[in-house]
Amino acid sequence: MPDSTQALSPDNMKEKTAAASDSVYLSANDSTAGNSLELVPSLNSKPDSNKVDSKMDSKPDSKPDSNIDEKAYPGRADDATADLERAREPDAEPAAPAPAALGDDDFPDGGAAAWLVVSGGWFALFCTFGLVNCVGVFEDYYVAGPLKEYSSSTVSWIVSVEIFIMVFSGTLFGRIYDSFGPRWMLWGGTVTYVFGLMMTSLSTKYYQFFLAQSIVSSLGSSAVFNCCLSAVVGWFSKRRGFAYGIMVSGSSVGGVVLPIMMTKLTESIGFPWMMRVVAFMFLGLLSFTCLTVKSRLPPRPRPFNFMEYVYVLKDKRMAITVTGHFFFMTGMFMPFNYILLQARAAGLSPSLVPYLLPILNAVSNMHIRSIFGRIIPGLVADKIGRYNVMIIITFTSALFCLAVWTPVNNTAGILVFAIIFGFSSGGFISLVPALISQIVDIHLIGTSVGTALAVQAFGALCGSPIGGAIVSAQNGSFLGLKLFCGFTMLAGSLIIAAARYTQVGWKLVKV
């Protein structure tokens, strides 16, 4: 069947119409406005060449040829309709190519800009997680002062929800980082964080402390530290663990300096003005963070899709890893929350109690002669494998809780445990984002790290209140709390070992 779109010259048309008995002519089907042309035998008639030419020039109509026999050629009409629809559609824009995987050589792994990001992140972690490491100071002050009518378990919800929101909000801020970069989130988080601390200084009731410290300040704090965790990934690969170790050591330095500073200021100028001094200091330090922390990889804006979080957890390695982090995080903050209360109950000198948290945080970061807890594990992890070092850290932390903390009830034992646990647990926070970045797409690092932090945030939320409830149920005894702490961390360590097994089995290789 000739096609109406085929070009026919006038000469060819004359030749075709010259023969009398052998010729055929092309007639347009009236019902379809010339969409199809059929061969009709004719002995006496001659075609109208002008009519044929006009039909040749006409554009095809949207309807398919009604002369197509559906019985003889099933589906032909539908095919014709589909072909015409596709012909009318504008050329579709080519799909954006998938981002190429980045190798180790694609990262600077150093340089002024990269180390400025680390330094800005160091100050951010000093101000954010450094204050979280002082939760024992808040717990001790609230129970003995403005919230003394509440139980320690009830008061612990203030700091537990603070840690939960600070960590869980990574699901939101990680996504914002991937889409828009860190700049405005850093400035907005800084202002919100400082405002929450100022409101805490004005609080006198339980709900006021809860709103100001647990909700407002933790949201601002989360925005700041999530930006820094995600930004470092784009600058380092081979030395990523070491860079994270340096940056996260800021939280331990804050845990050394801030408890002593806060205790002395509270004694001299009172809790409200102490909080205002801390807030103004954080404003200056975080301004430096806002000016130095930036992303090397360009942001990739995309519409919100909840299934991205589900997709991240579909990776078996990721799902098992974050489950292990959840269990370890459930027990990890109990020593920080309750070691001061246990020390007072054990008769530790009141002049020494404020220094327990600085001791705990000091050895998780550095010693007077050597750099320990959070820097050394990151450096070693780059050499022998991040999963390998994480398993060692989590297992020894659980072991020390069960073997050292559980049997002691005196001053010397508590001090020894504070030193050992601070050293063994120090690298956990610094290695969490390093582990996640090792198994996910680097272009989704904000979403992936945020999802992992959100899962383990539930552990931080429920751990301390459960521990407080155990203490209350045992009439002030800390034995049940210690066992619960140790076994939850041990479970976390074993699950992280299972995540390693899914990747390489039991082979002694770098993972």
Image (cartoon, rainbow, N blue to C red):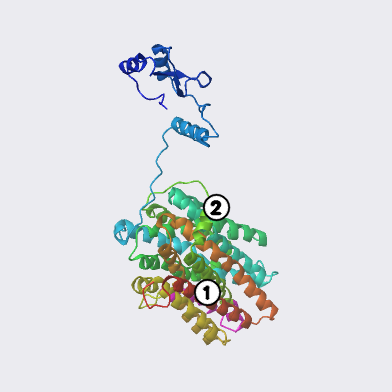
In this view, the mark in front (2 or 1): 2
Q: Residue at x 54, y 70 (%)?
A: 329
Q: Please name whichever residue, 272 or 491, is drawn nearer the observer in this view of the structure.
A: 491
Say which mark, if any, is on residue 306. Answer: 2
Residue 476, located in which quarter of the rendered image? bottom right
Q: Is residue 348 visible?
A: yes
Q: Amino acid at mark 2?
A: Phe
Are circles 2 and 1 on residues that touch, CB within 8 Å? no
Q: Please name whichever residue, 192 or 55, is drawn nearer the observer in this view of the structure.
A: 55
Q: Residue at x 41, y 34 (%)?
A: 91
Q: Amino acid at mark 1?
A: Gly
Residue 27, located in which quarter of the rendered image? top left
Image side of residue 205 versus residue 7, left or right: right
Residue at the disc numbered 1? 492
Counting every numbered tag in the picture gives: 2
The x, y position of residue 314, in whole percent, is: 51, 61
Q: Residue at x 33, y 58 (%)?
A: 114
Q: Secondary structure at mark 2?
A: loop
Query: Magenta part of the protein: which range?
Result: 341-365
Q: Earlier in the sequence, mark 2 or mark 1?
A: 2
Q: Main secondary structure of the magenta part?
A: helix
Return the residue found at the far front.
21
Query: Is 483 situated above or below 176?
Result: below
Question: Callout 1 environment at 10 Å: few (<14), some (14 to 19), or many (20+)?
Answer: many
The x, y position of residue 426, in whole percent, is: 45, 73
Q: Is 243 covered by the magenta stretch?
A: no
